[in-house]
Image (cartoon, rainbow, N blue to C red):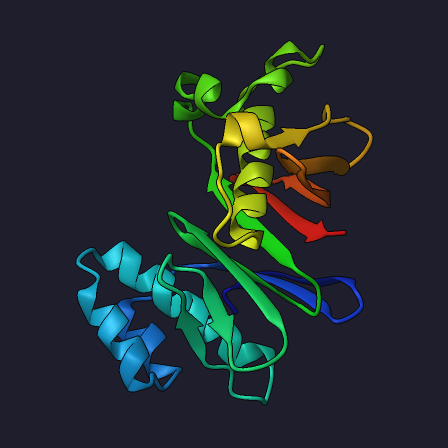
């Protein structure tokens, strides 16, 4: 079973993580794509992107007897054919999604040192916190900010200026964060975890 994590952090909220080990043909054999989804798949050039796309569809197939159909906004935000909210993420050989009654976002990143080279592009006040900005902490900050970005649509978004995340704590896996744009302010509960091969964060808009 390619699902490596399946948990419900809150009522009516579910998160699943899939480690992609299958071929494209195997992933296709487990689902039936509608015409719109098939067109999106056909536009993808790289096999890894096709696998990530199909892994998300496989996760949705496993989640419920209800047939979830996914559509996308002009900026690429996914929607379900239900009242539930969805956010998806994929990186390398992993794909994950969160489905919830609440406004949510999720992001997963595989470990890599590139994040150290771009930290000043997405961190501002966080650079002054008295914590070690090692690879995992930097990835978690990126996870949280990317998750907030995904949870909000059509909002001006500069990760440095518009999103603030409080210092991470080793003893905790939850941190407060905010989206701020002049008088427009949204607060989020941001949850994160550091695994052996990846970091993950998901946010719940309060």
Drawn side of residue 49 relative to residue 96, left or right:
left
Q: Residue furthest front?
A: 183
Q: Residue at x 62, y 44 (%)?
A: 201
Q: Is residue 88 left or right of residue 131?
A: left
Q: Nearer the viewer, residue 184 or 83?
A: 184
Residue 74, by quadrant, is bottom left
Q: Residue at x 53, y 45 (%)?
A: 149
Q: Is residue 119 above or below residue 174?
A: above
What's the residue at 29%, 80% (across, down)?
Answer: 36
What residue appears at the point 23 percent right and 58 percent down from the top-left corner? Answer: 47
In this rendered view, identify the residue nearer to me: 6 or 78.
78
Observer able to see residue 105? yes
- The image quarter containing residue 77 is bottom left
Q: Would you place residue 146 above or below residue 46 in this image?
A: above
Query: On the picture, is 48 further left or further right than 46?
Result: right
**Is residue 20 or residue 87 the one in the foreground?**
87
The image shows residue 69 at horizontal and vertical percentages of: 46, 81
Residue 178 rendering spot, x and y as whole percentages? 68, 37
Residue 26 at x, y percent in the picture: 32, 75
Numbered circles on residues, count:
0
Question: Closer to the camera, 22 or 140?
Answer: 140
Name the spot of residue 115 as percent of width and height, x first: 44, 25
Can residue 196 be seen?
no
């Amino acid at each position: 079973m390619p699902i490596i994590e399946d948990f419900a952090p809150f009522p009516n909220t579910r998160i699943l993580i899939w480690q992609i080990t299958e071929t494209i043909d195997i992933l296709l054999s487990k689902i039936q794509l509608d015409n719109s989804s098939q067109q999106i798949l056909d536009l993808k050039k790289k096999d890894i992107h096709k696998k990530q796309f199909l892994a998300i569809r496989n996760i949705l197939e496993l989640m419920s007897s209800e047939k979830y159909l996914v559509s996308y906004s002009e900026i690429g935000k996914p929607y379900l054919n239900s009242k539930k909210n969805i956010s998806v993420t994929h990186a390398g050989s992993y794909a994950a999604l969160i489905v919830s009654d609440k406004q949510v976002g999720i992001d997963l990143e595989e470990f890599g040192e590139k994040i150290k080279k771009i930290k000043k592009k997405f961190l501002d006040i966080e650079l002054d916190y008295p914590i070690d900005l090692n690879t995992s902490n930097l990835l978690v900050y990126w996870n949280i900010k990317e998750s907030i970005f995904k949870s909000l649509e059509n909002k001006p978004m500069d990760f440095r200026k518009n999103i603030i995340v409080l210092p991470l704590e080793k003893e905790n896996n939850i941190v407060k964060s905010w989206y701020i744009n002049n008088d427009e302010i949204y607060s989020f509960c941001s949850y994160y975890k550091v695994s052996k091969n990846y970091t993950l964060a998901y946010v719940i808009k309060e």
